Structures are given as C-alpha cells and as structure tokens.
Amino acid sequence: MNIKGKLASLAIVLALVAPVMTFAAPTKVVEWWHIGTAANDKAMFQGFADAYMKLHSDVQINITVLENEAFKSKLTTVMQSGNPPDVFQTWGGGVLGEYAQAGLLRDISKETKDTAWGKSMAAGVWATYTVDGKIYAVPNDAGCITFWYNKDLLAKVGYKSFPTDWADFLTLVKKLKAAGITPISLAGNDKWPAMHMWSYIALRLGGASLFADTVSGKNKAGFNEATWVKAGTMLNELAALKPFQDGFLGATYNDEAALVGNGVAAMELMGQWAPNVQKDNSSSKAGLGDKLAAAPFPAIKGGKGKVTEVIGGGGGFALGKNASDAAVDFVKFLTNVENMTTWAKTSGILATTKGAEVGITDPNAKMVKALVDKCTFFQLYLDQAFPPAVGGAVNDAVQTILAGTATPTQACAAIQSAFVAK
C-alpha cells in the first residue's frame, strides 16, 4: 500500500475511534481545601480522598493544604473573586453567614435536614453552620478552649493541679518565671490565640449576660462597656509579669505549639486540637505524651462568670456555590461513623457523628468533651462569631493591647466601631 493509501486507512481508524473518545464519561473534579498541616492529618485526609476515589472512579479530588492563617488569607481572596473551592474548612458563625448572604455557598439543607445524615449528629451541632434557617456546612468537631499544661513543669513549682482561681493562676505564673520556666506560650503574630485570653477574662468577669447582651445590642455601650475594658486591663496586668516567650509578638501558632510540645513553655490556652499540633511541631514528633493535661479557664473572684461557661467551637466543611453533588457526597463520606472514628483517633477531634466517640481515647479530650456536654453557656470564638471585619477588629485590638500601642479603652473602642459598622 502506498503512502496515500496508508493515510486514508489511518483516517478511517481515527474516525471510528473518535466518537468513543468524545463520549467517554467526564471526570467530576472536587477542589478540597483543608488546614490539616500535621503529618498524620495530611496522611489521613489523603487516605480519605483516595478511598472515595477508589469507590467513585469518575471523581477526582484535588487537595490543597494550607496553614490556618494562610488559609484565611487565600480564602478571602478567592471569595472576593467569586470562585470558592468546592469543599473548604469553616468555623461557622458570622464568617460563614457573610459568605452565605453573598451567594458564595451551596445550600445543603435538603441533604441534611430531617435526613439520616443530619440525624447522625446531635441537632445542636448544626446551629453554628446554619444561616437564616439554611445549612451551608457540615460539622465534624465540637469542643472548647482550655489551658493545656505540662504537669511536670507545674510540679517543679509545687502545683499538683491547675489553679481554679485567677489570683492563684497569677501566682503560678510568677513561680514559673522565678524558676526560669516560660509560663505561657503565645502566638502574638497570629493574633487569634491572644484573643482567646482576653475573651475568657471578659467571660469570667461579666458572665454569659455580657456576651449575650453585647452581641444582641441590648447593651448599648457594646464593647465600650466597662467589663470589656477591665478584661483588657487584666490582660495588661498579666502581660506585665512577662509570662510569654521572648519575641511572642512575632510568633506563629506553630511556634506556640512547639514550645509546649518541646517542654519549654508550661502551658498554652488553646482548643481541642492542641495536643496534635504540639506533637507535630515538637522535635521528637511525640509531644508531651502523659505529661500533658487540660484544665478550664480559672474563675475570677467577684466575677459573674461560671466555670461552666465556655468559649469554643469546632470545625466543619462548607460547600462552595458551584459544588457538585459529588462534592456533597464526598463530605457525607468524610463524616460517616467509620471515618469520623478514625479522625478522632488520629487527630483527637471531638467527633460530632454519633458512634464516633469510641475514637476518643485521650483522657484530656474526654475532659474537654465533658466540659462542652455540661456547659451552661457556649460562646463561639469571637473572631468567628462575627462577620470577618468585626472578627478581624477583635484580633487586631487585642494585639494592640499586648503590644502597648493602644490602651484597653482605645482597643475596645476600635472593636465597637467595627461592630456598629457591620
């Protein structure tokens, strides 16, 4: 056969094959952003994705892993562009509400309300992810902020247990300093860890009514109310003892976790994820092990707050406005009882799916869960409870108090200004 004949034959073959290629099933792509930067988290999440893709050969899951602050920054950018990821980390509250109202999220109410999936979790855990009666995200973790401390370091200065009173807590800080031990590790550069300290002082001073009345607007003074300012003054009094590591204003959360995980700092005020992050950022990759314990934020004498009133939250995954049914199904897969049990065992989360609590084996995690289960008031982290502009103002204001660039009165006024403008 001459060249022309061969080319003609090839053309016929290609013509026959082309329709087969054209009608091949298209791949459904799911863009998933998470903040599980710890090695075991990354491996676990990749395992979940691989398992799902094995079950659904027509789905491709692309994972983007970002550190907490980098995630928030990048998410803000893509949200402004109107092109959110299909599945991404959320803490609910005001931030989620703002995205929902801007039409940037997929409403998954029909998939979750009054369905087996929705009923696989306690009704209360969905509230943080509900906006105007519609559900936009799925919770996987619910806990509260507590002090995580090194039992051996406290024992060195005569403390067999964590102080239950603020005055005694300050005494502990002084004794640790005198012994050459860094009392508190703090990520001043990331701001939100310091926000938890100020928020808890305010809660112990003013109690649940302070938060409820401020958020609702019943308290006309808002964040200018004297109790919020006093919380800033007490934070200053703590800072005057120099309880934080040198250079704390430039430290990141990973730096904070490493100091505790390496046994350098005695404690940090952090959420239920703390042990896992400490472990991953420690030199040994083992963390403190049995030396680590957790305790509620101390009571303040004369304050209206109770130890049963907590600040906390958890994590979940929101669905972007263009998320496919495959993306929704993938999140359903992530939160089934088997995967959530694995998640609890691997990362120490306080899993929301019923039955997955068997994966919670750490006694500290069980203590945190008990605090949440028995709490008389639950406040979502302030930087998440409000829209981003207000949450950011809270974080910025607390940093200015610690940096000495604003008085507590000025810092609270800045928060109130953002709150009124929201």
Image (spheres, helix red, strand yellow):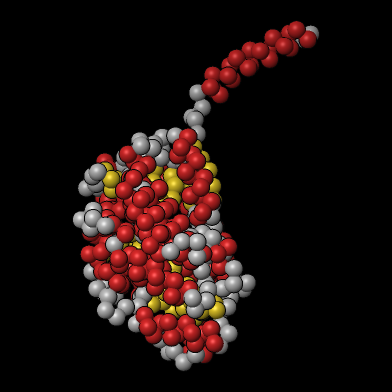
Q: Residue 93: where, in percent of width, then height?
A: 33, 52
Quarter of the image where one finds residue 131: top left
Q: Nearer the viewer, residue 345 or 129?
A: 129
Q: Residue 372: where, in percent of width, then height?
A: 30, 68
Point 48% across, 29% down: residue: 25
Point 53% across, 22% down: residue: 22
Q: Residue 343: where, in percent of width, then height?
A: 43, 61
Q: Residue 329: where, in percent of width, then height?
A: 38, 44
Point 49% across, 78% down: residue: 241
Do we see residue 230 in this rendering? yes
Q: Is 218 on the left-hand or right-hand side of 154?
A: left
- Point out the image quarter for the N terminus: top right
Q: Is residue 352 above or below residue 94?
A: below
Q: Nearer the viewer, residue 133 or 185?
A: 185
Q: Is residue 347 above or below residue 134?
A: below
Q: How many marks?
A: 0
Do we see residue 84 in this rendering? no
Point 41% across, 82% down: residue: 169
